[in-house]
Amino acid sequence: MKKSTLILLTASCAIAIAPLARGQAPGQGRGQAQEHKLVYRDDGTFGYMDTPTQPWSGYRVHDPDRAKPKTIDPGTFSTQDRPGRPPSDAIVLFDGKDLSKWKPNQWKVENGDLIATTGRFETVDDFGSYQLHLEWQAPNPPVGDDIMNRGNNGVLLMGSFEIQIFDPTTKIYPDGQAAAVYGQTPPLVTASLPPGQWEVYDIIFLAPKFNGDKLEEPARVTVLYNGVLVQNNQEIYGTTAHAALPRPYRPGRTRAPLALGAHNNPVRFRNIWIRPL
């Protein structure tokens, strides 16, 4: 049977690519000596067994027997009209109605949104390192006469390290604006949307590490704000505070509840999920 040839069309030309023969490694063209032999496993996985061993993993380079990553459903992205679907391996903290993952509080649910009232809102479970997704919306127009309290809230990682939530239209100090590590590090850029829109945080948090009570590695955080990188593996210098330097880490503490702050300002939340790392 005649083998087919794959044609790739680009904006300027067409490129003909000959089919890959069984046993021929990707990247090996005609006239090149084959240095490694492809082997196949029963499930169709192919790779090499005659390559160097990686000292950090114990597997060979391109090892077909290396453990495969778990396959998940990645979910869907949100729109302004509708929250997306979380990844299939995420722990859903708020789906528009269920508050069973949170400790009792005075916060309320209205039309599928979680609305801040008063008091810290904490998860029942403790978490260490994780990927966190949440969407928030500041009141439009701003509520209240206190300029320091417009759309004021915060994502409290381990209940101690605040990623600020604040009305994007209010010109607060840079280390207190939305997506700042509060009182420590402003975001790399301002990536807010127009007033009244749903803002999106995707946060990668690495918990601190201790040797006994001695801090070995501080916590670090990466934040994407509406899909834009605004905190890049940023060190967290201690417990965040208002108008003060960071307080020292609590010795030996590597897990704690996730919390949302409250300043009696009706910030809305939706689609909150977490993936422990």
Image: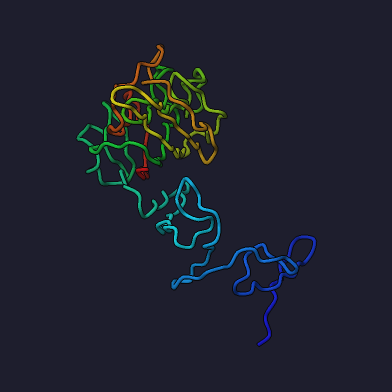
Q: Nearer the viewer, residue 28 or 251?
A: 28
Residue 84 in view of the camera: yes
Q: Nearer the viewer, residue 197 or 50?
A: 50
Residue 180 sits above or below residue 147 on the image: below
Looking at the rendering, which quadrant does residue 191 occupy?
top right
Give the residue at x 51% y 23%: 186
Looking at the rendering, which quadrant does residue 132 occupy?
top left
Give the residue at x 49% y 19%: 172
Q: Position of residue 222 (x, y in %)?
A: 47, 34
Instruction: Give the residue at the far left of this rendering.
Output: 104
Instruction: Give the residue at the far bottom of this rendering.
Output: 1
Q: Residue 158 vs residue 72: left or right?
A: left
* Quadrant occupied by the N terminus: bottom right
* Quadrant occupied by the C terminus: top left
Residue 169 sits above or below residue 43 on the image: above
Q: Position of residue 167 (x, y in %)?
A: 46, 27
Q: Nearer the viewer, residue 191 or 111?
A: 191
Residue 271 sits above or below residue 192 on the image: below
Instruction: Give the residue at the far right of this rendering.
Output: 12
The colouring scheme, among rainbow, by chain, secondary structure or one colour, is rainbow
Q: Position of residue 238 (x, y in %)?
A: 38, 20
